[in-house]
Image (cartoon, grey):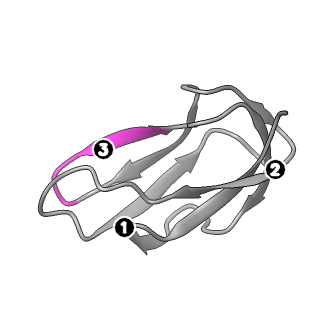
């Protein structure tokens, strides 16, 4: 089963975030709590962690892309 990774809402005033760096690439295994990427908002830079164990199977939004909160940025195939 695939699980989407969405652009998180970090602060109350946040409407969008910019992807700075993907630390994982398609095909990499990921563990719950492991950092996937770094995003920047108008007030801060923060890491986004995986919510599940699995394999990163698709990156929808690339580095330097600005994405609205709640939008899908990647997909992880969940380990069963």
Q: Quadrant of the C terminus?
A: top right
Quadrant hosting residue 47: top left
Q: Is residue 3 above or below residue 17?
A: above
Left or right: 55 in relation to 59: right
- Mark 1: few/some/many CA within 10 Å (<14, 14-19, 20+): some
Per the rendering, the mark at residue 26 is 2
Structural distance between the alpha carbons of marks 3 and 1: 15 Å
Q: Is residue 23 above or below residue 75?
A: above
The residue that mark 1 highlights is 69
Q: Position of residue 7 (x, y in %)?
A: 44, 60
Closest to the camera, between mark 1 and mark 2, is: 1
Q: Position of residue 19 (x, y in %)?
A: 47, 58
- Mark 3: few/some/many CA within 10 Å (<14, 14-19, 20+): some
Q: Position of residue 17 (x, y in %)?
A: 35, 63
Callout 2 secondary element: loop
Residue positioned most to the left: 13
Q: Position of residue 61 (x, y in %)?
A: 60, 68
Callout 1 secondary element: loop
Structural distance between the alpha carbons of marks 2 and 3: 23 Å
Q: Earlier in the sequence, mark 2 or mark 3?
A: 2
- Mark 2: few/some/many CA within 10 Å (<14, 14-19, 20+): few
Quadrant hosting residue 12: bottom left
Q: Earlier in the sequence, mark 1 or mark 2?
A: 2
Callout 3 secondary element: strand
Q: Residue at x 69, y 40 (%)?
A: 24
Left or right: 27 in relation to 54: right
User: What segment carries the magenta color?
Assistant: 42-48
Q: Residue at x 16, y 52 (%)?
A: 43
The residue that mark 3 highlights is 45
């Amino acid at each position: 089963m695939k699980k989407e990774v969405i652009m998180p809402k970090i602060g109350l005033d946040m409407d969008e975030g910019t992807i700075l760096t993907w630390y994982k690439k398609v095909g990499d295994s990921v563990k719950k709590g492991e950092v996937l990427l770094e995003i920047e908002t108008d007030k801060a830079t923060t890491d986004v962690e995986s919510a599940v164990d699995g394999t990163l199977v698709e990156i929808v939004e690339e580095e330097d892309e600005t994405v609205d909160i709640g939008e899908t940025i990647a997909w992880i195939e969940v380990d069963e």
